[in-house]
Image: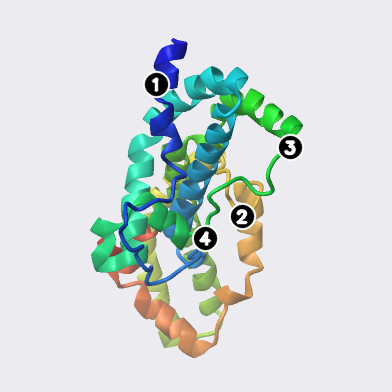
Amino acid sequence: MGRLLASLALAVAASPVFALDGQAPLQPQQAGYAFEQSRVVALQRFLGRAHGISLLVSACMDRPEYLDAALAAYIPWRERQESAIAAAQKELARHYFGSRAGEARWPDLVRALNLKNQLEPAPGAADLAAACETLPLALQRPRYDFAAQLRLQASLAEATAGAETELRWRWCREHLDDASRLVLDRRYDVWREINAPRQKQAEAALQGEWPFDAPADSLAAWQDLLQRDPLLRGDAAACEAFSESLKRPQAALRKAFLPTELSP
């Protein structure tokens, strides 16, 4: 078993390597985190977390007493998460590099995300030993199940969009004239009929399990924060625009977490 795991060391260590075989690095069209796009920022965090894990595993491999245990934990985890990581890598390549996404490699994304190629601050011997010892247990935690976390982030995006729509509707119907209010109510009723089942499903999923990177500790706490969000209010012109938006396909909750190219 030890020989088999050791033979896979090079494959694991390759993740944080930055050599590009003489190729000029791709220049991203944009850099940093896209906090205004819930799906993109979720993928950015997942990829950052995967990169951090690979750095830690590489550091653990430099300690012979931890090599076998680290690889025994990392390799099955990586196999389980491979499809989620590959999908995130592909989608973020499109986000950062546009038409050149097909040329993007892992180091290009690492640079675009401004990630480090080594653990910082460099852990002391005691800290590294503790991290290596707890790595097998850490990789079993929900935060490192990227596919499951992405599903929860989708539920959060849909539940948030549904709550925001209801809050805007409640605010706007108090700030429009009678005729405009009647139109708004009719549009909202249609929107609600179409989207209420999906919102209920998303909220039920979040009641069962809360995403690790959520902006609040629970669904109820998040809904309370949304109710106090001044950005969900507006003047009559903003409310008229909101009323119009309810007719558009983009208002559907199923669009809330789709990749950009699938959500025109």
Determine the CA span between mark 1 and mark 3. 27 Å
Q: Amino acid at mark 2?
A: Pro
Label 4 and label 2: CA atoms lie apart by 22 Å
Look at discs 4 and 2 and give the one toward the viewer. Answer: 4
Residue that numbered label 1 is attached to: 7
Q: Is residue 70 visible?
A: yes
Residue 38 in sight:
no
The answer to whether the residue labelled 4 contacts the one labelled 1, judged by CB atoms less than 8 Å apart, is no
Instruction: Report if the CB atoms under discs 1 and 3 are less than 8 Å apart.
Output: no
Distance in Å between CA atoms under marks 1 and 2: 41 Å
Which residue is disc 3 drawn over?
A: 124
Residue that mark 2 sits on: 215
Residue kind at label 3, given as amino acid type: Gly
Which numbered disc covers residue 58?
none
Q: Mark 2: which secondary structure? A: loop
- Pick whichever of labels 1 and 2 is earlier in the sequence: 1
Q: Which residue is mark 4?
A: 114
